[in-house]
Amino acid sequence: MKAAYYTETGGPEVIRYGELPTPEPREGEVLVRIAAASLNPIDTYIRAGTVAMPRPNPYIPGCDLAGTVVKLGPGVQRFQVGDRVWGSNQGLFGRQGTFAEYAAVREDWLYPIPAGVSEQEAAAVALVGITAHLGLFRCARLQPGEVVYVNGGTGGVGSMVVQMAKAIGALVITTVGSEAKAQLCRQWGADLVLNYKTDDIVASIKSFTQGQGVHVWFETLREPDYDRMVEGTRLRGRLVVIAGRQARPPFPHGPFYVKDLTLYGYAMFNATPEEQRRCAEDINRWLAEKRLQVPIGRIFKLSEAAQAHRFQEENTLHKAGTLVGKIVLVPE
């Protein structure tokens, strides 16, 4: 099969494209013919060596996939040949990834693609959708009528937070860097869209919430400002952090505890298959109901995986601002 792969960590140039053996599904696995995979920042961190992760050699990167089951391993019960499926959590903890024509995947990590949803949409929603759902509902227990704030409303996770919060009847405040992005967030139902370049975020939050602050502050920035987060969150509010592995920001211990606040940090790939499946069930329902739109910013071919990694890093690390939504890779 054709695959993007590498044998050593480094810059995007270490990624090669060529022939590798097609995997055979083992006990509890299915073989998926991949129609689309999506790229996430974690893929670039593993490739760069900044996140240490056990890897096969050669190693195929990529967490997310969508495609069709073409072969069943022994003991598979949830899927049949011909089923369209999507999933995440590949390319981690010694598992091969998804930047290939085929992947052997444990059925526990796969979910059916609803009718009317494309493989590209399903691949693009995978990691970011599950990440957003875990943070909003398993951690912060967001309720209808509550107010949630999220940075970057058109980013991968941010766009999911905006739409999932609206799907359950919450109010949403988010930030963007341009009017075009603001219009997109309003289309998804955001109640207040701020420009992080020009607006006073905390003052605007206080005005919108009549001085109370938000119930949930969902922080996506790699270097969070905890003073701003605590100030913008109401009594007994919840703070959620998902990024910034190397970050060591100052923490306002006093203001945090006297507001009775709670701080949640989590990594999506630590969630169990059962926890992730609960997320996928909601995601599938919202996709089928057209209440969840998946923004796709760029589509690359598998042979262009190095360029895709470079483009992701320009936006994640260097704040180029040229990506709205997800990067998707497709076979040749």
Image (tube, rainbow, N blue to C red):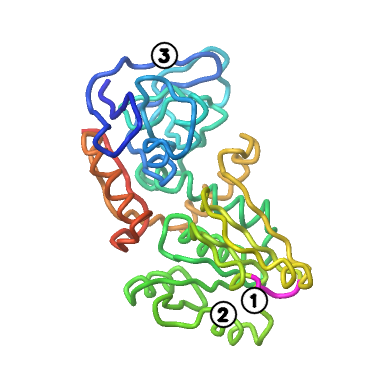
Instruction: Find out whether the residues at labels 2 and 1 contact each other: C-beta distance under 8 Å.
Output: yes
Left or right: 120, with 159 as reference point: left
Q: Amino acid at mark 2?
A: Val
Q: Position of residue 41 (x, y in %)?
A: 41, 46
Q: Give how far apart the Cα atoms at labels 2 and 1 are.
A: 7 Å
Residue at which label 1 appears: 231
> On the picture, is 229 further left or further right than 56?
right
- Front disc: 2 or 3: 2
Which image quarter holds the C terminus? top left
Q: Can you give x and y, in whole percent of width and height, for residue 321 in the image?
A: 32, 63
Q: Residues within 10 Å of mark 3 (few under 14, many from 20)?
A: some
Residue at mark 3: 24
**Nearer to me, 106 or 269:** 269
First of labels 2, 3 by sequence position: 3
Neighbour tally class for label 1: few under 14, some 14-19, many 20 plus, Cα within 10 Å: some
Q: What residue is rendered at 51% in x and 33% in y?
A: 110
Q: Is residue 266 above or below residue 220?
A: above
Report the amino acid beneath label 1: Glu
Residue 231 inside the magenta-drawn segment: yes
Looking at the image, residue 271 sits to the left or right of residue 22; the answer is right
Pointer 2: what residue? 202
Marks 3 and 2: in contact by CB < 8 Å?
no
Residue situated in front as seen by the camera: 86 or 297: 297
Is the residue 144 above or below the residue 84 in the image? below
Q: Secondary structure at mark 1?
A: helix
Q: Nearer the viewer, mark 3 or mark 1?
A: 1
Mark 2 Cα-neighbour bin, 10 Å: few <14, some 14–19, many ≥20: some
For the magenta stretch, what is the residue range? 230-235
| Residues at marks 2 and 3, CA–CA distance in whole angstroms | 53 Å
What SS does tag 3 mark? Answer: loop
Quarter-wise, where is residue 84 in the image? top left
